């Protein structure tokens, strides 16, 4: 099973200058931890750099053409990741990595951060396609959490 987790603002802002467009939001960080712990996180090299390295309780796999000795593994293609990683896999970003895996993803953990922030990277959840059903949704102080499945 391949999943994805992402957060965007009300105008699909995903990133800004190599980080998140908004200040640290404890509820969203807790949601991220809850839904990635015990899984293999798949990400691009910029996302790996932005999180500062490996996170406890999760395997960190980087989709890149370059070797990164700080990652648990690096692969040059989606096919290599799917062939070599047993999973469960969860794609955590960035936009290029979401797009590369979109046809393999069967569950999305999505946070909508209320408001519009300064962003230089945008990604719309609609880019995953139209065949999704929302199976869970709840509001929190800075936005809402949603789970979609196909």
Image: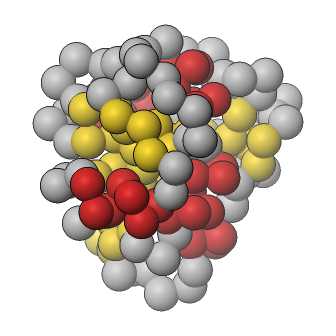
47 relative position to 33: left or right:
right
Give the total number of marks visible in the rendering.
Answer: 0
Residue at horizontal 46 percent and vertical 61 percent from the top:
78
User: In which quadrant will I find the N terminus?
Assistant: bottom left
Residue at horizontal 43 percent and vertical 30 percent from the top:
28
* Residue lying farthest to the bottom in this orientation: 131
Relative depth, front residue between 33 and 144 = 33
Residue 54: quarter of image: top left
Can residue 138 be spotted in the picture?
Answer: no
26 relative position to 127: left or right:
left
Residue at horizontal 21 percent and vertical 42 percent from the top:
39
Relative depth, front residue between 20 and 85 = 85
Classify 144 as above or below 66.
Answer: below
Residue 2: quarter of image: bottom left
Q: How is the image coloured?
A: secondary structure
Classify 47 as above or below 11.
Answer: above
User: Looking at the picture, how far across and down is residue 105, in whole percent?
Assistant: 39, 68
User: Looking at the picture, how far across and down is residue 104, in whole percent?
Assistant: 40, 73
Residue 21: quarter of image: top right
Classify 83 as above or below 74.
Answer: below
Residue at horizontal 65 percent and vertical 50 percent from the top:
95
């Amino acid at each position: 099973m391949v999943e994805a987790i992402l957060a965007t603002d009300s105008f699909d802002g995903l990133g800004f200058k190599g980080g998140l467009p908004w200040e640290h939001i404890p509820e969203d960080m807790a949601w991220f931890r809850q839904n990635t712990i015990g899984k293999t996180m798949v990400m691009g090299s910029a996302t790996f750099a932005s999180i500062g390295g490996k996170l406890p309780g999760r395997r960190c796999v980087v989709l890149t053409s370059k070797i990164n000795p700080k990652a648990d593994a690096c692969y040059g293609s989606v096919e290599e990741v799917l062939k070599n990683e047993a999973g469960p896999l969860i794609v955590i970003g960035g936009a290029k990595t979401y797009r590369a895996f979109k046809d393999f993803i069967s569950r999305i953990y999505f946070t909508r951060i209320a408001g519009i922030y300064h962003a230089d990277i945008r990604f719309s959840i609609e880019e995953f396609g139209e065949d999704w059903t929302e199976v869970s949704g709840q509001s929190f102080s800075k936005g809402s959490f949603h789970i979609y499945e196909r």
